[in-house]
Image (cartoon, rainbow, N blue to C red):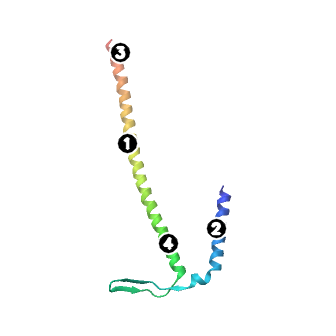
Amino acid sequence: MRYVKALLVLLLFVLGLTFFIQNAEMFTASLSLRFQIFDFGGRSGPIPFYMFLLLAFLIGGLVSFLYLVADKIKLHKELKNKKSRISSLEKELSSLRNMSLDEGKQREENV
């Protein structure tokens, strides 16, 4: 299975590289962004299109990473609470088991 995954990654890399080579003119074209709300606004200088794509992928990766980290922290906290609850229930069960054995011994001694 590991080799299949490696082969798929290699295939995707080759296809992506082919796509970028065949469309090099489009990715090197410069774009300028304009932002305007009412009378307030601005315009960016010419920036290559591939920089916009790279920035979009980086922002998407960062947002995904932050979401996954927040989810992992939440799950870690929940696991810690569950382990604490299990530990307290095991202690309670152990004390109840010991209590019933102690009561049985006392009854035998009284008879």
Q: Earlier in the sequence, mark 1 or mark 4?
A: 4
Q: Nearer the viewer, mark 3 or mark 2?
A: 2
Residue depicted at x 31% and y 14%: 110
Q: Position of residue 108 (x, y in %)?
A: 35, 15
- Secondary structure beneath label 4: helix
Q: Residue furthest top?
A: 111
Front residue (pair 100, 13): 13
Q: Earlier in the sequence, mark 1 or mark 2?
A: 2
Residue depicted at x 43% and y 57%: 71
Kind of residue indicated by mark 2: Leu
Kind of residue indicated by mark 1: Arg
- Secondary structure beneath label 2: helix
Q: Position of residue 33 (x, y in %)?
A: 45, 84
Give the residue number, with chain letter if any, for mark 1.
85
Instruction: Tell me whether circle 3 and circle 1 mark residues in contact (CB < 8 Å).
Output: no
Q: Dot 4 surroundings within 10 Å: few (below 14), some, or many (20 or more)?
A: few
Measured Cα–Cα span from mark 1 to mark 2:
47 Å
Which mark is drawn over residue 12? 2
Q: Earlier in the sequence, mark 4 or mark 2?
A: 2
Q: Earlier in the sequence, mark 3 or mark 1?
A: 1
Which mark is drawn over residue 21? none
Instruction: Tell me whether circle 4 and circle 2 mark residues in contact (CB < 8 Å).
Output: no
Q: Residue 101: which quarter of the image? A: top left
- Secondary structure beneath label 3: helix
Measured Cα–Cα span from mark 1 to mark 4:
40 Å
- Secondary structure beneath label 1: helix
Q: Position of residue 17 (x, y in %)?
A: 64, 74
Q: Earlier in the sequence, mark 4 or mark 3?
A: 4
Measured Cα–Cα span from mark 4 to mark 3:
74 Å
Give the residue number, with chain letter if any, for mark 4.
58
Relative to 102, is 72 on the left or the right?
Answer: right
Give the residue number, with chain letter if any, for mark 3.
108
